[in-house]
Image: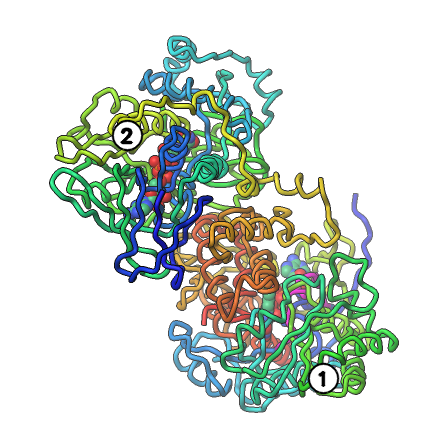
Amino acid sequence: MKCYYNTLNITHDYVTKKELFYNLLPLKEIKLETQVLIIGGGITGAGITRDLALRGINCILVEKHDINAGASGANHGLLHSGARYVAGNSVNAEECREEGNILKKMAPQCIEDTGGLFVAVEGDDEKYVADFPDLCSKCGIPVKALDTREALEIEPVLSKKIIATYQVSDAAVDPFKLSMDNIYQALDLGCTLLRHSKVTGFIIERNRALATRLQNMLTGEEFTIEALQVVNAAGAWAKEIAVLAGCAINLRYSKGSLLVTHNRIAQRVINRLRPSSNADILVPGGTVSILGTTSITIDSLDKIFPTVQETDFIVGEAAAMIPQLERTRYIRAYAGVRPLLGTPSVTDDRSLSRGFALLDHIEDGLENFASITGGKLTTYRLMAEKTANLICNRLGVSRPCLTRTDPLPPAGAARWTKPGLAPKVWMKKHDPEDIMLCECEMVPKSVVDSIVESIHEQNGKSDLKAIGLRSRIGKGACQGTFCGLRTCAYLYDINELNTNEGLTSLREFVNERWRGVRPLLWDTPLIQAELQEALYCGLMGLEL
Amino acid sequence: MIKDNPEINCELAVIGAGMAGIASALFASKRGISTVQVGLTSGIIFASGLIDLMGVHPISDGKIWENPWKAINALTSDIPNHPFARINKDDIHKAFEEFLAFMNNAGLPYCRYENRNAKMIMPVGSVKHTYCVPQTMWNGVLALEKKCSCLIIDIRGLRGFSARQITETLKTSWPALRHARISFPNTDHLEEVYTEPIARCLSLSENRKALAQIVIPHVKDASMVGFPAIFGIHNSVEIYRDLQEMIGVTIFEIPTIPPSITGLRIKETFESQLPQKGVRLLLQKKVLKVHRNKGGFVLDIGGSDTEYTVKAKGIILASGRFLGGGLHADRKQIRESIFNLPVFQVGERKNWHSQNFLDPKGHLINMAGLEIDNMFHPLDSLGKPVFKTLFAAGSILAHQDWLRMKCGSGLAIASAFAAVNAFKKQV
Ligand SMILES: Cc1cc2nc3c(=O)[nH]c(=O)nc-3n(C[C@H](O)[C@H](O)[C@H](O)COP(=O)(O)OP(=O)(O)OC[C@H]3O[C@@H](n4cnc5c(N)ncnc54)[C@H](O)[C@@H]3O)c2cc1C
Ligand SMILES: Cc1cc2nc3c(=O)[nH]c(=O)nc-3n(C[C@H](O)[C@H](O)[C@H](O)COP(=O)(O)OP(=O)(O)OC[C@H]3O[C@@H](n4cnc5c(N)ncnc54)[C@H](O)[C@@H]3O)c2cc1C
């Protein structure tokens, strides 16, 4: 791969394991070249980059914010057994079953194989309940009926009013780790990641996208990338990207909000046994549980955050299944957007029925541009495989897909995102100098050190937001109040923050965390928020 | 089974051991009122030791006032139901004089500019406008004003206090600022150190000597040295003077993030002084229930079960907001925790907080609280005093956003003063 880089003005936030060929070019002429450019650093983009890299193809992955900034960082973390889709869409259900099984084998480090339950409560549709086991069997999804006593024995939090329970093989998946592991292997294989790099347009000549225009979101600097093939894996933003290339995708947007509980409520994934609806799944994630979701059609991608009304709705609904959810303490809320595929421009009907769309844009008159959107976290590997097949075909590369059979190697830097994991590793090799920066989630100094180091490897700089994204800092019960201040002080101690960057960084960090706590502010979390405001505003005047 | 709990008779029961509670108990005792004070002191570890009077108004403009008295004038004309508007300005002056005189005699002296706010260095490097500053911190105000050559010290293993953070953040406006890290004497075997044990350690003069020896080589050309707040708990002034003499340059403390010793100093000062003035302290206890009787109120007090019964002619309710426990919110509304007094609400929950944590306008919920009359009686829904001898003081009051206006302790002291005087008048 040939890369030109401006050494005088290091502004690209780039990652590569390969030697870079430095070249002092005037700013305007900075050019990056690659075989395939992939747009979107979510799980789909990450998966495609790895798949292509395993086939020996050079890629650059560009992301406008940071890894998993979109739906991949704001979902439920459920590795679907498929059972949820048996009534609506059997192709979908079977795909989830198959992909779920592959991931459990190929990426066990990202998965907690909890198993799942489907439970119906008094008043739920009894016909649906009765049909459920047969529908599962038809899709090859193993299911086992439990009586109420058995169900309450293994999950005592369930309502006494349950009328039916089935056991399935749902699992919990850590989306951050999954994306990081995919990207890290691709980097090891020589690919490049550009974070904070937003695609702003294309240079199109006849039927080819010759170059892609980008802007560095941190510095405002503009640059271009020349690629033989361009993959638009921008999730809900795929329509915006397609429009820039003069293509059309018919997408609508649905926002879903989720609540994180203070403690883990149940051991297994708990689904409400009824046609897919709102607030009917509780997924464990390490030491917490995640409850959701809602589904609200929105017209714009600008304002994606959970609201007070959604919170009240979710809590009210889910309590029918697990009464404790009415009283439990919630520590965070977040929202993501699902792209909903409209019919008209989808070329392949089967792909529509799969829930994802791979568009080759031949009808739009482009030969080297493809879009992949929709789908699920659970099926990301398949989506990556299909996309990589199309791209390889176009490049005339005949190597087969390896992700079905080659295990995903665990990467180091991502391992701190999972609740509960940090203390275990810390206990293992406790070093006397290693003090806790976050007591709620037990994140020690050494974890921050290793994150800082990995960001350095990527030529980046660590601020609180970047550390927050890669660790549990700020995600515990104190809502970031104390760990934010301690981590900020620590980043100064190790020369990561300079001048008054800390004030900016703290402000960004608390505002970011705030979106997720604002809908939950009653009872204890409200007290916590008052303490935070007393410290950050009352005492230190950070609002001024 | 009915247990016989010890019964205590008094004229005034003060509910709360925050700033408003202790100020109420102090003012009451000085007026010869027999007083019982109940409340948890656990919140005091959050106190910075700084006493704000009034700093910012209007908050949406972030306008910072140099003169707190002028700020109060502007505030009370714009927000006539702010509690400050119900207190005579002379009385606010008197409240401060009385409070500060007490602190001075009790060995925790404060410094202030009579008509000007002081600027303090905060642990994150921001600069705070406040009114009264503990004497051990006052040189920091002068250092910041003069921008003199100054060294900030931090301590290995003390989390959340980075001298480099402070100097980096302030260096553009204060180039003569330097930083250095030291190991506190005899803590090399510790991974982590806390301010409280260090502070207690410094009450021994040999430890002060050892600390001074460690600091001296770092001083070089600095004419002032700033430390995290560690200069002892009971005898902070003595420790500060002693260290200053040994180090040979002017020194000062900078507040630390919680848990800090600055609050502990206030707590221990009042806990030792108030009983001497005749106040009966029932600290670490809560008021579980209050009944009415002919002469006033009967309070059930204890941890979880009643341990004491207090009969009082009147009550000052200084139970704070959500953090203190005076107010409680469920998903629908805000309640007052002990009497279920009417609370000035700020609409549905979706209006309570702004989308942006640091929204200059502040959060509406901070304006919620108890409505009062000019005698600091909480009012019922018809606007009449709930009880003739029930008064409220401090942050539980409505229409004040102390977090943004920077009037926390000042309002607590002034409203305590007003409530005690009103009680005295009434009884
Ligand atoms: C609320 C919710 C719950 C869900 N729960 C589950 C679940 O439990 N199980 C499951 O299997 N699936 C679940 N999903 C679906 C799953 O999250 C998504 O299918 C998956 O994350 C999509 O990944 P993606 O990479 O395609 O899109 P995204 O993760 O959205 O990635 C797109 C990326 O493109 C970037 N981008 C956008 N514009 C540009 C530009 N101009 N230049 C550069 N980059 C750009 C964005 O910043 C973003 O990072 C859920 C989805 C939602 C919304
Ligand atoms: C982090 C932080 C920083 C601050 N910094 C400053 C500053 O720099 N400058 C400044 O001027 N002010 C500052 N303050 C504000 C100030 O210290 C006081 O918190 C504020 O003035 C409110 O005081 P209060 O006495 O009304 O309430 P609180 O301090 O909240 O006290 C309430 C008291 O009531 C008690 N109580 C509640 N319910 C019961 C019950 N049922 N029975 C018995 N007792 C009960 C509680 O136990 C507690 O003792 C700060 C506060 C915090 C939290």
Is residue B372 at least partly visible in the picture?
yes
What residue appears at the point 29 percent right and 40 percent down from the top-left corner? A236
Judged from the image, the secondary structure of the residue bearing numbered disc 1 is: loop
Above/below status of A203 relative to A175: below
Q: How is the image coloured?
A: rainbow
Percent position (x, y) of residue A522? Answer: 50, 50
The numbered mark at residue A391 is 2
Residue B207 image-quadrant placement: bottom right
Circle 2 Cα neighbour tier, 10 Å, few/some/many (<14 / 14–19 / ≥20) = many
Does the segment drawn in magenta span residue A495? no
What residue appears at the point 56 percent right and 89 percent down from the top-left corner? B90
Magenta region, residue range? B37-50
Q: Chain of mark 2?
A: A
Circle 1 Cα neighbour tier, 10 Å, few/some/many (<14 / 14–19 / ≥20) = some
Percent position (x, y) of residue A481? Answer: 56, 58
| Residue of label 1 | B109
Q: Nearer the viewer, residue A126 or A480?
A: A480
What residue appears at the point 36 percent right and 46 percent down from the top-left corner? A63
The kind of residue on which mark 2 rests is Ile
What residue appears at the point 71 percent right and 64 percent down from the top-left corner? B156
